[in-house]
């Protein structure tokens, strides 16, 4: 698929004026979570809500990290998501749950994010049997 990065704005839920722009986050469809430096999250007031969450890395190693809630913005898309408080040595990642919430998908040829199209939902029409 190829690796590429995108810019992302992270906002604190309790006060969207508290925000940080991250010019480069690696898009990682293999990562469930989005990972942001703990220092940046703390700087804008994001608090850990889930502490010592066990996460299995791609190499099989299990680590523990804290997770908090933020508003993520990529281009004109935005969503609410959980983010991992990344520690020294961790990558800044935009994970697959964020991509789904943003309603974006990977265009692997162009190495960019594009609109995913209509959101799939259950029908509101009552079924007749």
Image (cartoon, rainbow, N blue to C red):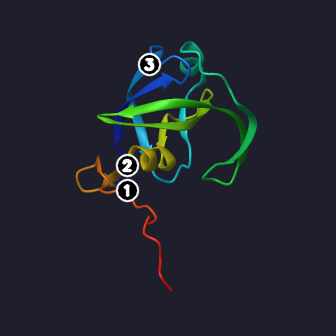
Q: Is residue 8 above or below residue 98?
A: above
Front tag of 3 and 2:
2
**CB atoms of marks 2 and 1 within 8 Å:** yes
Q: What is the spatial separation of the Cα atoms under label 2 and label 1, in whole angstroms? A: 7 Å
- Give the answer, above or below, for where 10 lies relative to 74: above
Residue found at x 48% / y 50%: 96
- Mark linked to residue 56: none
**Which residue is the extreme one toward the right?**
52
Task: Tell me which corner region of the image, top left, top right, bottom left or bottom right, holds residue 78.
Answer: top left
**Which residue is nearer to you in this view: 29 or 99?**
99
- Badge 2 or badge 1: first in the primary sequence: 2
Front: mark 2 or 1? 1
Give the residue drawn at x 37%, y 47%.
3
Q: Residue furthest left?
A: 110
Location of residue 116 in the rendering, given as x and y in whole percent from the top left corner: 32, 54
Q: CA distance from mark 3 to mark 2?
A: 21 Å
Q: Is residue 116 left or right of residue 97?
A: left
Residue that numbered label 1 is attached to:
119
Using the image, determine if residue 122 lies above or below residue 77.
below
- The x and y percentages for residue 72 are 44, 32
Cα separation, mark 1 vs mark 3, equals 28 Å
Pointers 3 and 2 in contact (C-beta within 8 Å):
no
Residue 113 at what x, y percent from top left?
A: 30, 46
**Secondary element at tag 1:** loop
Judging by the rendered image, the residue that carries numbered circle 2 is: 103
Which residue is rendered at x = 53% and y = 29% of the image?
70
Q: Which residue is mark 3?
A: 20
Question: Does dot 3 land on a helix, a strand or a loop?
Answer: strand
Is 70 on the left-hand or right-hand side of 59?
Answer: left
> Which residue is found at the position 35% from the left and 53% from the top?
105
Q: Is residue 68 above or below residue 54?
A: above
Give the mark nearer the N terminus: 3 vs 2.
Answer: 3
């Amino acid at each position: 698929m190829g690796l590429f990065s995108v810019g992302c704005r992270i906002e604190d839920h309790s006060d969207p004026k508290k925000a940080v722009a991250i010019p480069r986050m690696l898009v990682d469809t293999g990562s469930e979570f989005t990972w942001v430096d703990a220092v940046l999250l703390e700087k804008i007031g994001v608090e850990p809500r889930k502490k010592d969450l066990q996460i299995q890395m791609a190499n099989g190693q299990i680590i523990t990290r804290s997770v908090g809630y933020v508003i993520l913005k990529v281009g004109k898309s935005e969503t609410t998501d959980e983010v991992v408080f990344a520690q020294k040595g961790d990558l800044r990642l935009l994970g697959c749950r964020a991509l789904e919430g943003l309603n974006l998908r990977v265009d692997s040829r162009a190495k960019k994010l594009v609109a995913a199209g209509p959101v799939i939902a259950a029908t509101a029409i009552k079924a007749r049997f």
